[in-house]
Amino acid sequence: MSVEEALAILDTALQQERLNDVQEIVFRCCWEGQTYAEIADSAGYDPGYIKDVGSKLWQLLSESLGEKVSKSNLQAVLRRNLHRLSVPQELPSPFPFSSLPLSFP
């Protein structure tokens, strides 16, 4: 799964909420295995700020996905939720009686 696919899954999981720019930077970089210090250095932020954004991001994702999300289990959690969040729910048939046998006179 690519980071783009993971972000698309998050769009579904978060419903009306969206990741802000810094949250998306943290998500993308953590997905690629970077440390908070590396993220802060490359993005031009204080390491403490990036760590705080990461912590709040994992809390948000944990609530949305219904299981604990952390920097270290991020990919595993999204893979587990891939099918549930990317496959649309089956819609009811517009013909509720279509499964009944037809009888002719």
Image: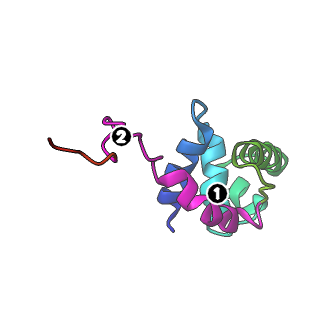
Q: Kindly identify the residue that appears in the image at 75 percent across and 65 percent down.
A: 35
Give how far across and how far down residue 25 sits, in percent: 61, 50
Residue nearest the observer in this picture, 47 or 26 = 26
For the C terminus, give its image quadrant: top left
Residue behind mark 1: 42
- The amino acid sitting under disc 1 is Ser
Residue nearest the observer in this picture, 38 or 73 = 73
Q: Residues within 10 Å of mark 2 (few under 14, many from 20)?
A: few
Q: Kindly identify the residue that appears in the image at 76 percent across and 61 percent down.
A: 71
Taking the view exactly as shown, the residue that stands out farthest to the front is 105
* First along the sequence among labels 1 and 2: 1
Badge 1 marks a residue whose secondary structure is helix
- Image quarter for residue 68? bottom right
Residue 70 covered by magenta stretch: no
| Marker disc for residue 93 | 2
Residue 73 at least partly seen: yes
Residue nearest the observer in this picture, 39 or 86 = 86
- Say whether marks 1 and 2 touch (CB < 8 Å): no
Residue 73 covered by magenta stretch: yes
- The amino acid sitting under disc 2 is Ser
Give above or below for 22 relative to 76.
above
86 to the left or right of 103: right
Q: Which residues are magenta?
A: 71-99
Colour scheme shown: rainbow
Q: Kindly identify the residue that appears in the image at 82 percent across and 50 percent down.
A: 51
Give how far across and how far down residue 38 sits, in percent: 72, 62
